[in-house]
Image: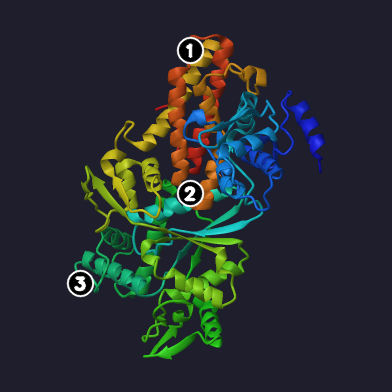
Amino acid sequence: MTMYLCEVRAWYKDAQGGFCPPFGLTPFKGKLYLWDMNSYIYDLLQKALSGLDISEPPEIQLESPKVAEHGDISTNIAMLLAKPLRQNPRAIAQQLLDTMPLDPQVLEAIEIAGPGFINFRFAKEYVYQQLRAIIEEGSDFGKTASRKGQRIQIEFVSANPTGPLTVGHGRNAVLGDTIARLLEWTGASVDREYYFNDAGRQMRVLGQSVQARYQQLLGQSIELPEGGYEGAYIIDIAQGIVDQYGKEWEEKDWEAFKKVAQEAIFADISQTLERMNIHMDSFFNEFDLYENGDIEKVLAALKEKGLVYEADGATWFKTTEFGKEKDTVLVKSTGEPTYRLPDIAYHANKLDRGYDECVDVFGADHIATYPDVLSALQALGYDEQRIRVIVYQFVTLVKDGQPFKMSTRKANFVTLDELMDEVGSDVTRFFFLMRSSNTHLEFDIGQAKEAGEKNPVFYLQYAHARIHSILRKAEEEYGAAPESPTLEQLKPLVHPSELTLMKTLFKLPKAIAGAADANEPHRLINYLNDVATDFTSFYHDCRIMGVEQECAQARVLLARQTARVLSNGLGILGIHAPEQM
């Protein structure tokens, strides 16, 4: 149904109890009750600029001031205009302000500050309406539609089934899963895929390692194969075979042992991911690329374009054509493909499946290899811009600033399960996310085990639980607050700490969208920390218990929506939001 703006204003005013957004205020997420103030102010400034004698005005820049006295949104446009107009920036700011209408239901004031900043201050009615929007949206508050209709595939974890998931795999897994959640909250349909290889030398050595341990358990004097897997998990798998088959497998070859080992390890990986609250939609076996001829098709297509040649018994890709100093081997002289060749075929397969975007989550050891894959895709006629690569740095376990060596039974490395046993799955997820993925992560075990404000995830979870404790006490004292309050019922919220908290809460949609666009989940964590901090200030300054009922219930509504925002944000991070601690 199409509605003209005048009809929207009339409908909105009737439906929302008197508040009507001004002309030019554009819908955020396509709903009539949640608005993007930046767009509204941008439109005001654009119209004001049209009255100035300048053919190409500079780009309008809007920012949220860090100091409340500077308003809610500020622009330096007058200072940018000073040179081309050859005027004092404060005088230009006054000219712009004189032509901008002030709707008191949306903006309380437009002010000139300092050398020529223009500061916009939100009206209380507008802020109350945003709080009502949070109440209306509930568990969906924060969702937007910027990627509606897009199909996105994200490939992550992708560890071969040769052993348990490590701490390094953990950062990959949590980063990939959280980015998938962020993309879903911006409207995309997301498929999570696990890519693996159950063939090749690694898998042969795995089978031979289990076979050797099986023979040792039967009393035979057998050495592990060269480069064999030494972890206790190999002995566990071999013991399972002994328990089930006894000596019946003495004549079996390594491939039979490989099959059992692969199934056992994949079952272990699946359980670990389940503990991390991670669920895959599909698994893709590299072997299928050989079976269906995709590898040969890629080689043939690159040869046809003159980008592949033979030298020293190997097959080379002319990566120098794409700016690299040296060409790159695709097939070794032994006939074994390097990782790049199946990776090229796999990415072509993904794009052929019709995804609008394919996201790869790689460790820093892939920095040198993935550009070759993108170059090959470009050469094959694919739009390589549809591939988004996220590279994360590695993880070091520390305690009190020193490297920390956990006792590990399963392997000669710390497994993800062992880390979760030590600090818990919520803490593990949070610590993997709280720093930018492109920085090295020092996972502080001591801080992770702290049950206090030094532990950042405890700080957020405790804030959520504390609010619910307050709500339970308030309901005993005042009864239930209204589920759908009118603007009048929110008007007792006038204290600066109350207004600051409300303004922080309705930034959630932009915080989520910004984190999704930048592939940086830690931005959402930073936002949630701001919410918790602003709630602490509010609760310090504004008592809920022992005040008049109208004021108490308005504050209860604000506290309840704070808990909602924390719950929604923690849910995106894959972390529980407890109501009691």
Pair 3/2: label in front? 2
Q: In the shown orientation, is residue 564 left or right of residue 222?
A: right
Give the percent coordinates (x, y) of residue 121: 59, 29
Mark 2 nearby-residue class (10 Å; few <14, some 14–19, many ≥20): many
Mark 3 neighbour density, 10 Å: few (under 14) some (14–19) many (20 or more): few
Dot placed on the residue nearer the N-terminal end, 1 or 2 = 2
Answer with left or right where residue 531 lies relative to residue 421.
right
For residue 536, above or below residue 349: above
Q: Is residue 526 left or right of residue 247?
A: right
Q: Which residue is drawn at the image coordinates 62% and 18% (left, top)?
A: 491
Q: Which residue is mark 1?
A: 545
Q: Position of residue 367 (x, y in %)?
A: 40, 66
Q: Secondary structure at mark 1?
A: loop
First of labels 3, 2 by sequence position: 2
Name the residue tied to disc 2: 178
Q: Is residue 323 above or below residue 14?
A: below
Q: Nearer the viewer, residue 175 or 5?
A: 5
Residue at 23% over, 70% down: 224
Please, what is the three-letter code of the amino acid marked with disc 2? Thr
User: Do tag 3 and tag 2 residues touch (Cβ < 8 Å)?
Assistant: no
Residue denoted by label 3: 223
State how far apart marks 1 and 2 are (Cα): 38 Å
Q: CA separation, marks 1 and 3?
A: 72 Å
- Would residue 374 be visible to someone looking at this image? yes
Q: Earlier in the sequence, mark 1 or mark 3?
A: 3
**Secondary element type, mark 3:** loop
